[in-house]
Amino acid sequence: MRTMLKIEWRRALTSRGMMAALGIGTVLALSQIVTMVLPMLQYLDYYKIYTYKSSLIPHAVFCKWIGGECVSLQNYLYFLLLPILAALPFAGSYFTDCKSGYLKNIYLRTRKIRYLIAKFSAVFLSGGMAVVLPLLLNLGLTAALLPSLLPRTVSGFYAIDAVSMWADLFYTHPYVYIALYMAVIFAYAGLLASVALVVSFFVENRFVVMLAPFLLYLFVHTVLTVFNGNQYCPMEIVNPVQPIFPCTNTAIVLAELAGLALITGGIFFGKGRHDDTF
């Protein structure tokens, strides 16, 4: 089992798809620094020489990093393209393994369940990492350029209000809030990537397999928006700014993640163990 995990994780983390996903994410993360963070440095210099500092609130990390503002093109594109970034590294690998004959050779050497567990974990892990790592890069660079001042509601800089999920945590321990939100983003990204594993059983085109998580993401967003169910919409939930009305809550997030894990995992392991794939 350990050997199978190492093989699949190595394939996922060193794939061209992973490099492409990290490249796209990094471009978005760095361009957001250029357009949204660097222009704020001039105001920070003014704050340093301003005599009455108590009456002036400088721009800080938590309202200017890519997950702390919702006005830039980069923020919009990043969380719109999240399923594509998650799927690029390894989501299409099961389909490719089946069609290339690689899977037949694997099943001659190990039990199916070992390969399936390794495959699912590698897709989940690579999908989450491909999305979260550029966000961490953006956060680190923003923290190197702007002060990490505690958010203040009176500043008007922050979209998180009293009814937002984990609002108290955001205004008292913002880095803890960000860490928890990164875990939420990682989980959604990994599970959305696993949607491609399920679709691999039903279609004969790798492009459709890779695009399936994004199409599901858009479909759910459209349906929930039409029926005023924004608090259940993954596209809105994964954005740390929480541009949602009405707001989501922890129970909704955990229920969606658990449901997605049960559905994708159940179908993938169920069909994977009983289907003849070669």
Image (cartoon, helix red, strand yellow):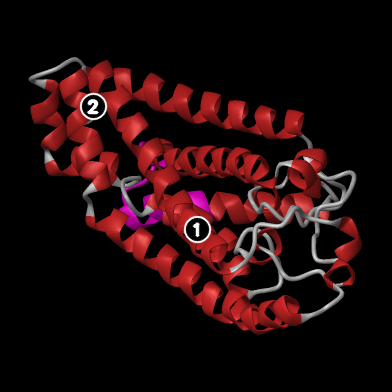
- Dot 2 crowding, Cα within 10 Å, few <14, some 14–19, many 20+: some
Q: Secondary structure at mark 1?
A: helix
Front one among 162 and 200: 162
Instruction: Identify whether 61 is placed above or below 4.
Output: below
Q: Position of residue 158 (x, y in %)?
A: 80, 60
* Stretch of the chain drawn in magenta: 199-214
Residue under the image location 40 percent in, 27 percent down? 268
- Mark 1–mark 2 distance (CA, rounded to whole Å): 30 Å
> Which numbered marker is on residue 140?
1
- Which comes sooner in the sequence, label 1 or label 2? 2
Q: Nearer the viewer, mark 1 or mark 2?
A: 1
The amino acid on which the numbered mark 2 sits, given as a three-letter code, is Leu
Q: Position of residue 105 (x, y in %)?
A: 8, 29
Q: Secondary structure at mark 2?
A: helix
Front one among 110 and 245: 245
- In the rendered structure, are the residues bearing label 1 and label 2 in contact, judged by CB atoms less than 8 Å apart? no
Left or right placement of residue 162 versus residue 232 in this view: right
Residue under the image location 47 percent in, 72 percent down? 30
- Dot 1 crowding, Cα within 10 Å, few <14, some 14–19, many 20+: few
**Residue annotated with mark 2:** 5
- Give the position of the C terminus as an image quadrant: top left
Instruction: Identify whether 120 is placed above or below 149.
Output: above
Examine the image and state in which quarter residue 74 appears. Answer: bottom right
Q: Position of residue 265 (x, y in %)?
A: 45, 25
Left or right placement of residue 213 versus residue 12 in this view: right
> Which numbered marker is on residue 22?
none
Residue 247, visible in the rendered structure: yes
Residue under the image location 20 percent in, 39 percent down? 10
- Give the position of the N terminus as an image quadrant: top left
Left or right placement of residue 91 versus residue 42 in this view: left
Residue under the image location 66 percent in, 29 percent down? 254
The amino acid on which the numbered mark 1 sits, given as a three-letter code, is Gly
